[in-house]
Image: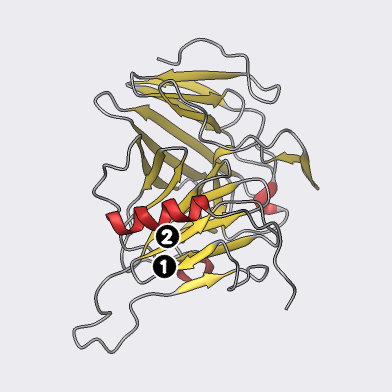
Amino acid sequence: MAGNLMDGFQGEPTRALESRFLRLEFMLRSPRIVRLAPAGQSNLFADLGNTPTRTPYGDFYFRGGHRLWHAPEAMPRTYVPDDQGATVEEIPGGVRIAQPGDPWTHIAKSIEIRLEDGRPGVGLRQELRNDGAWTVELAPWSVTMLRLGGVGIFPQPAGGGDADGLLPNRHMAFWPYARLDDPRLILRDDFVLVRAEPCLPPLKFGYLDSDGWIGYWIDGVLFVKRFAPEAGARFPDGGCNAECYCGDHFFELESLGPLASLKPGESVYHNETWEVYTSQATPLIPDKIWEIIDSLLKRPASRTLESS
């Protein structure tokens, strides 16, 4: 099922899973997915090269593609290198990539990857396991880095927060470097849209997504991440289970599971389903939003924001 050994990605060995709809490539020494492409089309994921981020535990490489982290983000905890020690096991319909606990948090990671037979879909079962001697509070954090040039799509809650319509029904969190007047950001009642183009400073926001999906439209392809919203759970980053980052070289779709106090030997799981549509014929997004997305992609790029 794992296919043949590929030429690799940034000097690292890889293998591929393929269906008649999709081709997916994963690393052998790290729980990373580095390429995803509809049949006969280009890789949707970003390729950032192998420039490292220096940490006390060695060099961390973003690389591009998909990775499993745990929130909240912190230096150096989040950036402990993850490019060695993984094992790959074939499972029914796919593979399981497992990596032992790192030397700082002792949190072990694994990702089970399965391509669906009858449609262009991917199932991910992602695990964080505490192999240490003390309890760790964390939330699983599923990060997918996509290449620039498209539009991020984030559905917003509809209806009142209570029966009388007196309570708020949504909130958004913005990171300190983000600008509310960022020209890439389009705030609407039904959807938030983000045009993924190079622009500084970076943009990052998060929110509590009750719909359980977020998407990205690029070059005629809609990539959708689905996850369980888990209403009533406690999430990191001010209560966010969905986040977006748009930098100068890549665009991220991020989903998060609830915060958990993980005792030694315990695991927490965060599942995602990826769907890939090669046309706009999807019930997820109304025609009016497609019209707005098309208009955004026709606008000229804006490299920087003026200082206030």
- Residue at 65%, 58% (x, y): give it: 302
Q: Is residue 40 left or right of residue 278?
A: right
Residues at marks 2 and 1, CA–CA distance in whole angstroms: 5 Å
Whether 255 is drawn above or below 186: the answer is above
Q: Is residue 82 left or right of residue 50?
A: left
Q: Secondary structure at mark 2?
A: loop
Q: Is residue 59 left or right of residue 179?
A: right
User: Badge 2 is on which residue?
Assistant: 258
In this orientation, which residue lies closer to the viewer: 255 or 284? Answer: 284
Is label 2 in contact with label 1 (beta carbons under 8 Å)? Answer: yes
User: Badge 1 is on which residue?
Assistant: 234
Q: Is residue 106 left or right of residue 154?
A: right
Residue type, label 2 = Pro
In this orientation, which residue lies closer to the viewer: 8 or 302? Answer: 302
Q: Secondary structure at mark 1?
A: loop
**Residue 134: percent from left, percent from top:** 58, 55
* The label number, if any, that marks residue 16 in the structure image: none
- Residue at 45%, 65% (x, y): give it: 235
Sequence order check, earlier mark of 2 and 1 = 1
**Residue 197: percent from left, percent from top:** 60, 51
Pick out the residue farthest to the left. 163
- Rendered-image quadrant of the C terminus: bottom right
- Residue at 27%, 70% (x, y): give it: 158
Please rate how many residues cluster around mark 1, counting C-alpha atoms within 10 Å: few if below 14, some from 14 to 19, many from 20. some
Whether 41 is drawn above or below 150: the answer is above
- Rendered-image quadrant of the N terminus: top left
- Residue at 40%, 47% (x, y): give it: 270
**Residue 165: percent from left, percent from top:** 24, 86
